[in-house]
Amino acid sequence: MPIAIAAAKAGGPEVLHEINLPTPAPKAGEVLVKHNAIGVNFIDTYFRSGLYPWPVDKDLVLGSEAAGTVAALGDGVTDFAVGDRVAYTIPNGAYVSERVIEARHLVKLPDGVSDEVAAASMLKGLTAHYLLHRSFKVEKGQTVLFHAAAGGVGLIAGQWLAAKGVTAIGTAGGPEKCALAAKHGYAHTIDYKSEDFVERVKEITGGEGVHAVYDSIGHDTIAGSMNCLKTFGTLVNFGQSSGPYLDFKLSDLAVGSYTVTRPVLFHFTADRAYLESAAADLFAMIENGTLKINVNQRYPLAKADQSHIALEGRKTTGSTVLIP
């Protein structure tokens, strides 16, 4: 019988518990996928805690990325076959041993990308893709600031930025995380625990500021991030691990004719053409060695609560996966 890890109600990691599910059968346009690895991300904690609205009253199954093997096909599915290795990223539902999913969300995995790497990179890698290619399209010679540089998205973005010839400044908590970020493409690192990142960015850029800031921290950093921008700079806020920033006014942008955007990955991946193209770009970069995906933490699916404790306690680096 398939199992799932669900949040009984909004709250801390202690609300996560195991539930049994009926064996699913795919309907028309759907595919049954047996999971081999499941990604863990901050967005999972946002839903679990109630920071993001729930689509159900209770027992919300978390998880937004996974990889596995096609076990059965619904009517009309022609792009996949039983035995295909596939991966996906959609909101919630991935903390399960197997699930039915619409075929339009799946992409096939090339031989050079393992299930663990795929589960650790679909959400984070495609997030890095849209950030650098759509939200603020970086160009060679530019300078950007990326917060949480030692996190899953940050480590992928640092490598991608370096490959594009962009000077990346990364913030991280502590010397070990700064050293890790430096090994993954960041030309400069800032330890936010001991340094004022705004002052350091000004020093690094000679007072000019950066073309863009990619900020997934939120409450603790947004004001400082805007102070790091050069005139006409862009603030890309794509998360809020420290809580939402509530003190924003449109007039704040007038200081430097700034642009601010709050993109959401799933708006991009809803476009099948973009999903296929971006995933192909991501997998090609992984296969040719440009992007190295660090799966640094592994937990059994039944121990998902422990993964959340480590993630929220900022005890993790790179990516975390659950193994059913």
Image (spheres, rainbow, N blue to C red):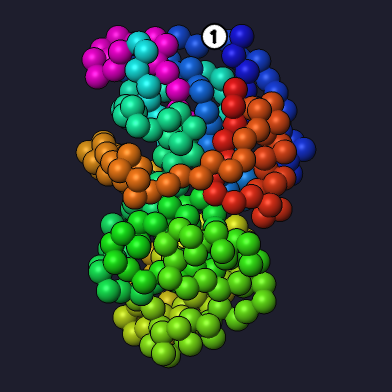
Rendered location of residue 298, percent (x, y): 62, 35
Viewer-side residue, 30 vs 84: 84
Rendered location of residue 170, percent (x, y): 49, 68
User: In percent of the image, x 65 and y 15: which residue is there?
Assistant: 20
Where does the magenta region start and end? 65-81
The local secondary structure at tag 1 comes to loop
Q: Quadrant of the N terminus?
A: top right
Residue 184 part of the magenta segment: no
Q: Is residue 304 above or below residue 268?
A: above
Q: Quadrant of the C terminus?
A: top right
User: In percent of the image, x 33 and y 27: which residue is there?
Assistant: 111
Task: Say left or right for 143 vs 308.
Answer: left
Rendered location of residue 28, percent (x, y): 33, 13
User: In percent of the image, x 43 and y 30: which residue is there?
Assistant: 114
Q: Which residue is mark 1?
A: 23
Residue pushed farthest bottom?
A: 207
Residue 78 part of the magenta segment: yes
The quadrant holding residue 47 is top right
Q: Is residue 248 visible?
A: no
User: Which residue type carries mark 1?
Assistant: Thr
Q: Is residue 234 above or below residue 207?
A: above
Q: Is residue 45 visible?
A: yes
Rendered location of residue 33, percent (x, y): 44, 18
Viewer-side residue, 93 vs 199: 199
Viewer-side residue, 310 vs 288: 288
